Image: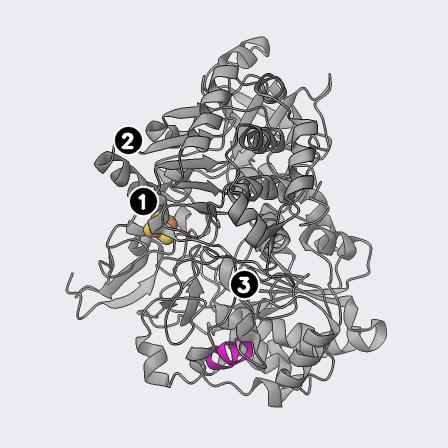
Amino acid sequence: MEEQTAIKTTCPYCGVGCGVLAMLDEEGAAQIAGDPQHPANFGRLCSKGAALGETVDLEGRLLHPMVDGERASWEQALDTVAGRLRSIIDQHGPEAVAFYGSGQMLTEDYYVSNKLFKGFIGTPHVDTNSRLCMASAVVGHKRAFGSDTVPGNYADLESADLLIIAGANLAWCHPVLYQRVKAAKAERPDMRVVVIDPRRTDTCEIADLHLPLAPGTDVWLWNGLLSYLAVEGHTDYAFLEAHTEGFGAAIEAARASAPNVPAVAGQCDLPEADVLAFFRWFAATERTVSLYSQGVNQSSTGSDKVSSIINCHLLTGRIGRSGMGPFSITGQPNAMGGREVGGLANQLAAHMDYSAETVDRVRRFWQAPNLVSGPGNKAVDLFQAIERGEIRAVWIMATNPMVSLPDADRMRRALAGCELVVVSEAMACTDTTAVADVLLPAMAWGEKDGTVTNSERRISRQRPFLPPPGEAQPDWWALCKVALRLGFGDGFAYEKPAEIFREHAALSGFENNGSRDFDISALANLHDAGYEAMAPRQWPIRDGRDTGRLFADGGFFTESGKARLIPLTPRPPVNAPDTDYSLVLNTGRVRDHWHTMTRTGKSPRLSAHEVTPFLQMHPDDAARLDLGDGALARVHSHWGEALARVRLDDGQRPGSVFMPMHWNDQYALRGRVDAVVNPVTDPDSGEPEFKHTPVAVSPV
Ligand code: SF4
């Protein structure tokens, strides 16, 4: 592909955030290639990214607004949304209204939604499906660093001498990053990789050691490591004294719960020799990166799991330097951008938490008449508040929560009973559009224009190369039109995404915000042409320069400037298996599908990889239940049921089963696994326990 004539954009799938070159050929077909200049992927693409051209046809698209099941004009739809919102607000107050967004949204859309709902409508109930993927990492970061900051970058994974991959099937879920690590290991065979995961996944192909720990026992393992490092003399006292606090209590708690290798091995159900090897390798290897993802985050103890990993890096001073540090990898393309604008219910805006000072600052910056003063409901709580009738109107954007939320049948009943459900969607028929009162046709990838931020804090442009189909409009545009009808026009008179981005950047530096981690104020004066041409930038941007790493010499964002080690007492998952529900269900992704398959399901090539929902089982469990390979099985729990084909796999821990998250009730086999998943959440992060639901499996 001619690089000069192609449009440079960014892949809409995972948090690696690969640069893509896109163009239309003479027949009008989309041609896709990796962008050799983009620092996330240097030209690589995985199967999903490479097949993007197969997913941009218009079949199934929502092409015009709908109101109460009837086609409507934009004027009618916007009037309906604004009128019904106004009526509900007048009768029940602004907190009867909520917004539920997505890590698929562009930062500009996110910014406008956060500003409208928190600042002008005056409801704190603004949350996002990013709650389901990385909220525990946010809590872990804030506890330790005083800010939601990923300290390092992708190059650190390549330059590490020891890479620990915890709770992440990198080979399938972040394939280009996996390819980079694999290439680095091929070049430096002494580089070691440890995979910590109850399942033996494709990522284990590059593992020198796989620790298939018992589900939910991560804090025991990492506490054990902290204890070992302290006892064996691997504490970096100079770093600890200068840059941290709380290490004494953290070590004490670790020693109380995980005093030695046999205790850890027993608790985690791992061979002692393997636990010892892991501890020794960590102790002996200064350049160590611990990468973690949903297997850590999606847990009722997800925040503690993240803290237990960060504790070990702080104790040894291994942070912020080349090839070392804890590293959270996000699932979605713009989970990070959502965090930047404050798109989580417990954030205000621009990485600011709620305080009298920040609320006053944002109120003045936005000239916001109704700015909220404290946090709102997190995702699962938000839908449960809809069920109770406390929230009577919700605007859902770029996500399909009726498939992706835990206890999904109950969530569907709750949403069906909600007074006003507005859904901004690119696709006409999803499980969520089925219960909408108003449908607003959204632009899809290839049509949208804005920015996204990947897992290494790198902001990239998503640029359009296709015309918007039918009457599809940008999400920020629809939000602004409703704001205008609600009487808030002055704050939402944007005409293009560049204007929104400039305001977002200005807020990040407003009144010395530069002292915090998220600072892109250097981009606040970017003119339109500069925004159009903007190359990837890595925040914080200080003195005009991007920041690749933070915290090598302290400089944490806590009040004291010191990082905090957190004392942790491990807790088991909330719902334990019993005689009726004796297996533990783990859910996750497959290689070639994305979320609820509204886009990847269009590609025959991608769909061919996994055709039906499957239930991965250890052969011993299957034999006990009289299930053969390929048998149709019913998976059920206290909360619901789904169907799947049994797949025998001795990489599965006995007693644990795995089922992918992508299928829904529109497919022939009702493989909507989140109907089965328990709605338990982490008390601090609100992230659901997708990795641990007691289930029973029976032949159909
Ligand atoms: Fe897209 Fe992720 Fe694949 Fe990169 S690794 S091409 S961002 S899905």
- Above/below status of 162 relative to 439: above
Highlighted magenta segment, given as a residue range: 501-508
> In this orientation, which residue lies closer to the viewer: 230 or 622?
230
Estimate how packed mark 3 is, as few (under 14), some (14 to 19) or many (20 or more) residues with alpha carbons within 10 Å.
many
Nearer-N-terminus badge (3/1) = 1
Magenta segment's dominant SS is helix
Amino acid at circle 3:
Gly
Picture coordinates of residue 542 (x, y %)? 43, 73
Q: Label 3's element?
A: helix
Q: CA distance from mark 1 to mark 2?
A: 11 Å
Residue 578 found in image quarter: top right
Residue 127 found in image quarter: bottom right
Q: Which mark is residue 338?
A: 3
Residue 281 in the figure: left or right of residue 314: left
Tell which tag, 3 or 1, sits nearer the viewer: 1
Q: CA distance from mark 3 to mark 1?
A: 29 Å
Q: Which mark is residue 190?
A: 2
Picture coordinates of residue 455 (x, y %)? 44, 54
CB-based contact (under 8 Å), mark 3 and mark 2: no
Q: Quadrant of the C terminus?
A: top right
Picture coordinates of residue 124 (x, y %)? 72, 67
Q: CA distance from mark 3 to mark 2?
A: 38 Å
Tell which tag, 3 or 2, sits nearer the viewer: 2
Residue at image point 31% right, 59% down: 19
Amino acid at circle 2:
Asp
Asked if the stretch drawn in magenta spans residue 337, the answer is: no
Amino acid at circle 1:
Ser
> In this orientation, which residue lies closer to the viewer: 618 or 336?
336
Q: Label 2's element?
A: loop
Q: Residue furthest left?
A: 2
Residue ID for mark 1:
159
Nearer-N-terminus badge (3/2) = 2
